Each structure stands twice: as C-alpha cells, then as structure tokens.
Amino acid sequence: MKTTFALCFAFAVNALALCPFAEMKRSGILSEEDIAKFEAVKRDPKAAEELFQAHQAKKREAAPEPAAGGIIGPTLNGLLDLPFGGGLLNGLLQPLTGKLAGIGLPTPQPQGLKEIPGNDPLHQFKAPGPTDIRGICPTLNALANHGYISRNGITSFAEAANAVQTGYGFTFGLSVFLSALGLMAGGDLVSGKYTIGGADPRVPNTLGPAGGLSKHGVFEIDGSITREDVNFGNNANFLLQRWNEYVAESKAQGGLFNIQTQAVDNGFRYDNSLKTNPNFFAGIIWFAVSHAERVFVYTGLANGTTGKADYANVAPFFLNETFPQNWYRRGVPFTLPQAFQQAGQMFLLNPRPLGGNQGVGNFVPLNLKTDLSTQSPSQLGCFILENLLDVAPDQLDPVIYNNWELYTGFIKGELHTDPGIEVTWSNIFLMTCGWVILGVIAPFFISDGYFNCPAATLFVKPGQSAGVSKNGQSSSGSPVNGAYPGIGVIAPDSQPS
C-alpha cells in the first residue's frame, strides 16, 4: 500500500521536475521491479505506453467474475464509492445522484419467444401524425408506431432501453448501452430525454442544444444503409434506391440479410462515401455503429420462430416501419458480448481503414495505436468503451466539452484521489491516484466475466475549440404502408448511390 502510493507520488512529482526519486531509491522504498520500470520510462518515454498496455492485458485476464448479489463497482478503503450513483446490484442499475438524479433508469424486462405485437390492443400499428417525430432508425420508428415508446417520438433513456428489450429480445445490458448512446448522441443528459429524430422543443436544452438522435456523428453516420450522408442534405429521409440496392445484395446470399450481406453492404457504402463525400469520416464511433446497425438487422429483425432475416421479415421494418404479421421476437436474448463478436466478424469479412476525407481524393487515415484487425471481441469492447466520445473534431459537440464531468460520469464515473488506496500502473501513467467510479454503461464492461475492461481507464478530454453543435433533422414523412410522401427519391443535389 505504502509502496504503491509512493510510486504514484514519485511519478506525478517527477513530471514537474520536483521528484525525490533518487532519494526514494537510496532509502529502499522502491522495489527492484519498480526501479527498473521507472528507469525504463526515463530512458524512453514510450515505455510508459508499453507498461500501461501490459498492465491492462494482465488485469483483463485476472479480473474475477462478479460476486453473486454484490454491487459491481470500485471501492475506497474497502467501501463502495459511487458519488455519481450507478453501478449494478443484483443485475439492477442503481440510482444516479447530483445533477444526474433526474435520469430515470431502465429495468430488466421479460424475455423469451413471443409474438410482437400480437393482439395487444396497446401496441397495434398507428401511422405517425403531423407532430410526431421519426428519424434515422427503422427499428425505433417501428417501436414508436406501435407505442412501445411514446408515439410522438420523444423518448427517454429508460423507456427506449425497456422497449428494445420487449420488442426485439435484446438483453438488459445491450439495451442500456444502446439507449445510453442515443441519449448522449443528441439528448438532454439531465432529464434523460431525447427524440428519435431531430431537434424538438419538447426536449429540454438544460446543458445546451439537444439535437436529437439524427444528429450527425454518433448514431447517425456516413455510409448508413438507407440514409444519405449529411453532407448531401437530409440524413434522416429513407432512400428507396438504397433499399433496392440492399435487397439486390441479399439476393446474392439466397435472399437473406445475413452477415455476408451486411459485410458487402458496409464496404459498398464506405467506398461510395469515400469517392463522393468530401467530408466523409469513418472514425471509432463509425466503426462501432456501422457494423452494429447491420448486426441488428439479422439478429433483431429475424423471425424468432425460424431465425431467418429474409425479405418477408426485414422489409416491413424498413418500408412500413411496422412489425410483420406473425412476427416473433427471438427466443434467446441477444447479448452485448455477442454484438461485439458479430461486429468484429463482420469487419474482418470486408475490412476498411478508419480515417476521413479532407476533400474527395484526399483520405487521411487515423493514426491508431491499436490494430482493430488483431483485437479479440472482448478487447474490441474495451476499446470502444474507452473511445465512446471520440468523434471527428468538427463533429464534437461543445456541450460535451463544457459538461465533461457529467458525460464521463454518466458513462463510467468521476476520478477521485485518496492517499490511502492501492494504485495501479495505469493510474501511475495517468499521473493520478484513485479508482474510476462507475456510472451506467461501464458496469456492463468491468468485472463482467467477459470484457473485464480495466476500471481505471480515462477519457481524453478534447480541446476547447474542438467542434460545433449542429441539430439533427427529422424525416420529412414516414415510409408507412408503402407510401413515400417526399421520401424515396434521391434529389439532384444528393449523394450519388
């Protein structure tokens, strides 16, 4: 305990040219192993990164399974420390506190094979009215059209997470992860509300403009299945031409929208955006969303009775934004680890480099230290968790910058220091002493028995002039019952397909 604190103190002070490192060596406070590590860092600063990565890998391997009935979260002096609230107790998210206390929390919903909506009178299809909002995601639009979330398209972190479990058979952890991303993408973090389309005055702007789920950069990305890139116009409207191309790709796979179809489509859309969009950007969030949205087509929209994601089961979601007749949700819930497993497999089937255009014909790759093609699904999950807010520089919302502690607290918590706690090497090289406090997303990745991500990983805060805030757009109509008012036609100034 004393040695680890001394290590942290020495490293932090040494960074300021005030470290009594030599005296600590002579006094015998440091072990031979500690001395060797410090000497390595002094000779070559790059050694710090190597030690940090080695520590992460070791901790990931050694992380224990969560104790049954115990709260998943870090401790200080043997006591659970959750000043922001959150964490998991018996599989339930615990209430948030402080400025985040107003966020309602989702709960696990009944799972298993079930006809959706069946004869449930509360969830029959109803086309959206003139003040109802719809947006980029056919599955969320369908949930709204059937009343699993508010029919006006104004939803919340808790409501959407619960609805995804009920409608599509996704597990609690995966549903929480997806709805949390939706809230951070363009919602009001303090109230927990967001729209499934563009900005709307019915969602508070407590911290700044709440742009809606269609806001570019998180859920809405370049190269999506049936929406054009934001550079070319309305990124929320359904494009019939893209859908027809998607169907043609499925026919090459026996009419199935399986992983092979999705890999082909993802590569096709990437290549098209690369050639036509001067502002095309495929960053870390693009990597996660572009593969995940396609994974959910064949895992979430397939009929639970057959497991087939064919035209009869998939088309109604895209064309009518409704559940098909005699459609059953999956019998075995789809999990967060499975989502990353499938996304990784899809990427390897048809990989593309991450980066962005600085004008057409001038693609600049991201300088990543991590080769995504070599990562296991669990490592990939930790990588995505660490980079949840890493979007293109001109897409970062100043609301996130100005409320950094709240956003990182919502994801995984706030870092506190305490001279009486054990310190890991990852903390030493971040020049801090303490544990990261868990919020509502990280508990599903830390000590979970699969990902086991290091609890002490921090987000890197962007520069103050990192970006601008742009509201998302709602679709100008809804492709319901085969009617496409103002939708499905690529305008002259829109993206070539």
Image: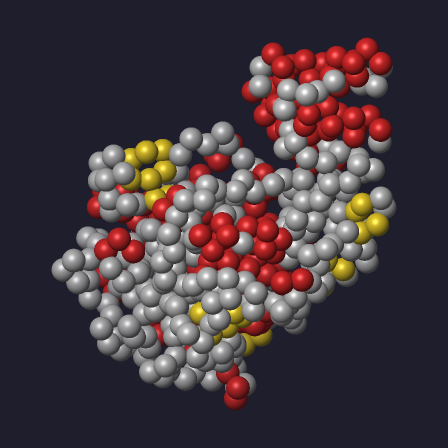
Q: Residue at x 39, y 48 (%)?
A: 467
Q: Quadrant of the N terminus?
A: top right
Which of 78/375 is in front? 78
* Residue sitting farthest toward the left: 492
Q: What's the image's color scheme?
A: secondary structure
Q: Is residue 260 left or right of residue 18?
A: left
* Residue sitting farthest toward the front: 18
Asked if residue 251 shows in the view, the reply is no
Q: Is residue 50 above or below residue 227?
A: above
Asked if residue 154 shows in the view, the reply is yes
Q: Residue at x 36, y 38 (%)?
A: 355
Q: Is residue 102 above or below residue 275?
A: below
Which of 127/79 is in front? 79
* Residue sitting farthest toward the bottom: 121
Q: Residue at x 78, y 55 (%)?
A: 71
Q: Is residue 398 left or right of residue 95?
A: left
Q: Position of residue 152 (x, y in %)?
A: 43, 79
Q: Position of residue 474 (x, y in %)?
A: 34, 69
Which of 348/248 is in front? 348
Q: Position of residue 265 (x, y in %)?
A: 33, 50
Q: Position of residue 312 (x, y in %)?
A: 38, 69
Q: Residue at x 83, y 19 (%)?
A: 29
The part of the image, by quadrant, that contains residue 247 is bottom left
